Image (cartoon, grey):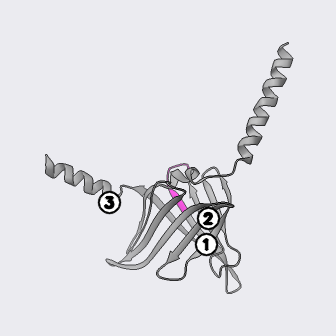
Amino acid sequence: MGNVTRIIFFVCLCLIVVSAEDRQPTINDFSWLTGCWENNTGKRQRDENWSKPKGGTMFGTGRAVVDGKTTEYEFMRIHQEADGLYFTAQPSGQPQATFKLVSLRNKIAIFENPKHDFPQRVIYALNADGSLQARIEGDLNGAKRGIDFPFVRTRCENDQQKEAANVHQN
């Protein structure tokens, strides 16, 4: 009887693993991206802020600041559509570009749009230490190119504003 029980347990475990792998990702699987992220390297400061998943969408904003002036900005969203999840970005007033999620495993998300000029791939990865690695890559003028954007989690300005308001009330 012990061997039969083990076999049944093993079969059930395999079914659970297979069904978990077949499950299509949802916007809630991106909750790890929620919050504020920054990268301060010398003169350039870069940040991204992501809202919580809600209503099938997450909204993000990004900017780069050099010598106290905004030099780049970007409006982003991750959104659920009938055929999957998408990342849409509109950098610095350029036309928006949309990339389809092709893989989400272990908090590494890969979005692709092979028809876009550059990039053709957008990647977000949450590292084991809690830092975030964003990357854009693809072909640019016939050459392979990739740009990494490492971030660390930081407190959101709204949290700091709420704390300041609480201090002034006390």
Which residue carries the number 1 mark? 98
- Is 74 situated left or right of 28 in this image? left
Label 3 sits on a secondary structure element that is helix
Query: What amino acid type should be assigned to the residue bearing mark 2?
Result: Tyr
Q: Return the x and y of residue 131 as percentages of the image width and height.
A: 50, 55
**Residue at position x 74%, y 41% from top?**
19
Range of magenta residues? 128-133
Q: Is the magenta stretch mostly helix, strand or loop?
A: loop
Residue 119: % across, % down: 62, 76
Mark number, residue 86: 2
For disc 3, the marked residue is 157
Q: Which amino acid type corresponds to the residue marked 3 in the rendered image? A: Glu
Q: Quadrant of the N terminus?
A: top right
Chain-order first, disc 2 or disc 3: 2
Measured Cα–Cα span from mark 3 to mark 1: 28 Å
Q: Do the residues labelled 1 and 2 touch (CB within 8 Å)?
A: yes
Local crowd at mark 2 within 10 Å, few (<14), some, or many (≥20)? many
